[in-house]
Every structure is written in C-alpha cells, then in structure tokens.
Image (spheres, grey):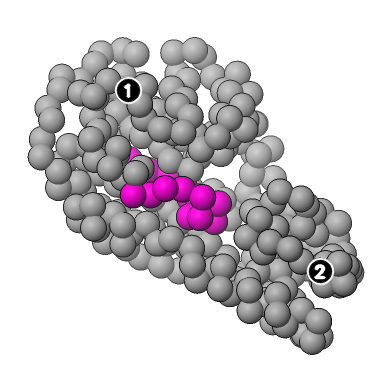
Amino acid sequence: MDRWVQRQLGQEGERLQRLRERLWREIPWTRRDRVLLLGVRSLIWALDPLRATPEGGVTVLCKNDADRSRLEAQMDLLEPEHQPELLTGNLDALPESQAFDWIGGRLAAADLQGQNWTALLKTINQHAEPTTGLRLLISRAELGPAGALLQDGEPTELLSDLVAQEQQWLELQQRPEKLLAKAGWQLRCEEWLEHLMLPGGTELAERWLIDGSPYRQAMGEISKEVMTQLRQSLNDLGEVGLRLPMRHQLIQGKCSMPSKKTPKPGLK
C-alpha cells in the first residue's frame, strides 16, 4: 500500500501529501467512527479514515460509474474487511437510520459544477447528527489555460474572448460553504493560494482540450482557429511549463440538525 501511494503521488508527492495531511489534521478519530467521503477519485484521500476507523467504516459516494470503477481497481490492494463501501450517485442505498460521525473529502472543479448540491446536502443532512464533523478540501483554479498563458505573456488578440469566457466559467463555480451554511452547518473556513508549475507539451494540452473534458464542456464550441492556437501554445511551453494559480479552501464544521441516534455497529 505504501509503495502504491508513492507511485500515485509521483512527482507531486510532497505537494499532495501536504494537502492530504492538512485535510485530516488533528481529527479526533475513534475506531468506531462512520465516515462519508465525497469527491474521492483516488484512494489516497481515503487512507486516513480507513486506517483510523476499522470498526466503524468508510462509505465513498462516487459521482459516476467511471469514478467507481477507478476506485474498485485500487481497492484490490486492501483486504476485504478494510475496503470502503462504494455508492454511486446518491445515498439511497443506505438505511434511513444510518448516521455518519464525519463527512469529508477533496473536491475539484468538476464537483463544483456538475453536482446538484442542494439535493446532495438534503440527503447528507438526513444521515448526520448534531455531533457530525465536516472536513472538505476544495481546490479550484484561478485561471483557465488561456488566462494562464496570458499571465505568462502569450499574445492575447486571438485568445481574448476565450479568456473572458474562462473567467465567467470560474466565477460561476458553486461555493459549497454558502450552501452548507444555508443547510444548517456551523462552519469555519481557511483559504490559501498555491502556484503550480505544469510541464508543457501534448499531455498538458490533452488534459484540457480532449473532447469531453470539463473544460471543453464548459467552454462549448471553440473555433478551429482559436483551438489550434491554444493547443500549439500549450505544446510549445516545453520545460518552461505553465504557471497556474490554485485556490485551496479547507472547510471545517459541525452539523446542527436534530438528533437521529442509532447504535454504532461493531466490525463491518
């Protein structure tokens, strides 16, 4: 497992390790805690609660079948009794009486845009207690690829309209802390800025520009001329790379819903 974690972290190992530690720092776990994880697309974000709560259990809410399949492949590394429960789309498969002691996870741009947060929070509140704790790490880019190129001095005449469209897209991303507070959670938040250096080349271009990517879906139709320029600019970056500012937000809180006490289970 430790070797797998190091391979998954790769060149970003120290950075992701710091984010992971910050997400779960100083949580007073008990062995019987029941944990619900959101936005988890890699097992590395689930390792801390999995290790800390062997008699309670971890449930991962997968956004779609692709995320579930990815996690199922990674779970082969774990003994069956240590594997999390995976749900897809919603929490309907859970008993109505089941409540979680902790709700957490790491959310990215796709989670902030494609999720029906109002419906999700309504369901989550049905499985929360007044003592339920919250830990969410939200990571969102401050610029899109065209905006980041502009920041680094790329000629802007052809990409200017796309830069404006990117900013509108980023500004419209949902802010879960507002919806959580409205749903009755008591919160405290901290934010910090990080600058990533992304190696240029075809891999970077494909991450954003491949058909079906969140970026392409958000931008809609992009003219062939603009697409060619954007792809060429990203490919030409080479070792210099692209400087992308990332805004991280750590949301901590407690539920203030009426109690729905249920006895905690023993071993899963």
Residue 94 numbered mark, or none: 1
At 23% from the left and 35% from the top, the residue drawn is: 126
At 62% from the left and 60% from the top, the residue drawn is: 218
Instruction: Identify the amino acid type marked 2.
Output: Ser
At 51% from the left and 55% from the top, the residue drawn is: 113
At 58% from the left and 55% from the top, the residue drawn is: 15
Q: Is 149 rendered above or below residue 118? A: below
Residue 111: say if magenta: yes
Q: Is 36 rendered above or below residue 196? A: above
Task: Pick the quarter of the image with the C terminus.
Answer: top left
Q: Residue 86, image x and y in percent?
A: 47, 25
Which secondary structure, mark 1? loop
Instruction: Identify the amino acid type marked 1.
Output: Leu
Q: Which quadrant of the view contains residue 147?
A: bottom right
Q: Is 147 rendered above or below residue 34? A: below
Nearer the observer: mark 2 or 1; the answer is 2
**Magenta stretch, residue numbers:** 103-118
How far apart are labels 2 and 1 at the CA level? 46 Å
Q: Residue 152, image x and y in percent?
A: 74, 81
Which residue carries the number 2 mark?
223
Q: Residue 251, image x and y in percent?
A: 34, 56
